[in-house]
Image: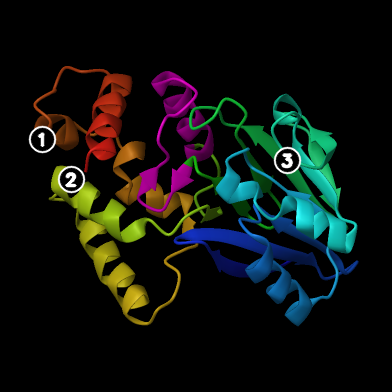
Amino acid sequence: MEIEIIPCLNDNYSYLIKDSQTNTVAIIDPSEFDPCDKKINQKYKKLDFILNTHHHFDHIGGNTELKNKYGSKVLGFEDDQKRIPGIDILLKDDKEFKIGDLNFKTIFIPGHTIGHVAFYFEQEKIIFTGDTLFSLGCGRVFEGTYEQMFNSLNKIKNLPGDTKIYCGHEYTKNNLSFCLKFDPNNNYLKDKKKEINSRIKDMKPTIPSTIKDEIQTNIFLRCDDPDIKGTLNLKKASDLEIFTKLRDLKDNF
């Protein structure tokens, strides 16, 4: 499996993937046409599939032009069929689909939107999480509930630790500052800071991360941690209450 990271708009990432065995090419969350088309022309000169994690414009903005140019099939979650332009194939929760010889499972993860999904390539140990799980962060809760988002993050958290995470935005620097504010004694986070700053200095993406890294450093996956509860002065709060508090704080950070 080949993966090309395509920076788009201000801080979006689109992903061009190829199954090397069958030469099948797909793009995940094409934010805009021009940079995606440029990378497709440079690498493969074809595009078989377009996959969307959710309906927000900065994840579907290139759908129509790419589909028209390359004759691609658009894949999206069945509940979002009226909100994803050009949709051809409706994906179902916990069901598999093949891109060439690459199998992926659609995982329903509502919260950011009510139709958000992730694409999990189990054999390759890769997941594309859109705007649900970021490196050191999570998405805002726009359409769903805090409980939905909390449960969605836990779904991802329970995947194997060596699973690589490709998310929808380059938000890591800001997320790092937030995590350090409320989890200041986390030594894993301090080590992560050095790694992140090095990548930013070299003008490289800070992704992919891994499930293991996020469990150790991402405050939104650590809502059961007594130190974090203490920092918030909410020692007796439930994990969901801690998540809700942190998400509200992050909205205004």
* Residue sitting at x 78%, y 59%: 66
- Secondary structure type for disc 2: loop
- Secondary structure type for disc 3: strand
Disc 2 + disc 1, Cβ < 8 Å: yes
| Residue corresponding to mark 1 | 231
On screen, 41 above or below 227? below
On screen, 71 above or below 90? below
| Residue corresponding to mark 3 | 105
- Secondary structure type for disc 1: helix
On screen, 96 above or below 98? above
Q: Identify the amino acid type marked 1.
A: Thr
Specify which label sits upstream in the sequence, 1 or 3: 3
Q: Identify the amino acid type marked 2.
A: Asp
Query: Which numbered disc covers residue 183?
Result: 2
Q: Position of residue 59 (x, y in %)?
A: 60, 49
Q: Identify the amino acid type marked 3.
A: Lys
Q: Residues within 10 Å of mark 1 (few under 14, many from 20)?
A: few
**Which segment is the magenta one?**
133-157
Examine the image and state in which quarter residue 11 appears: bottom left
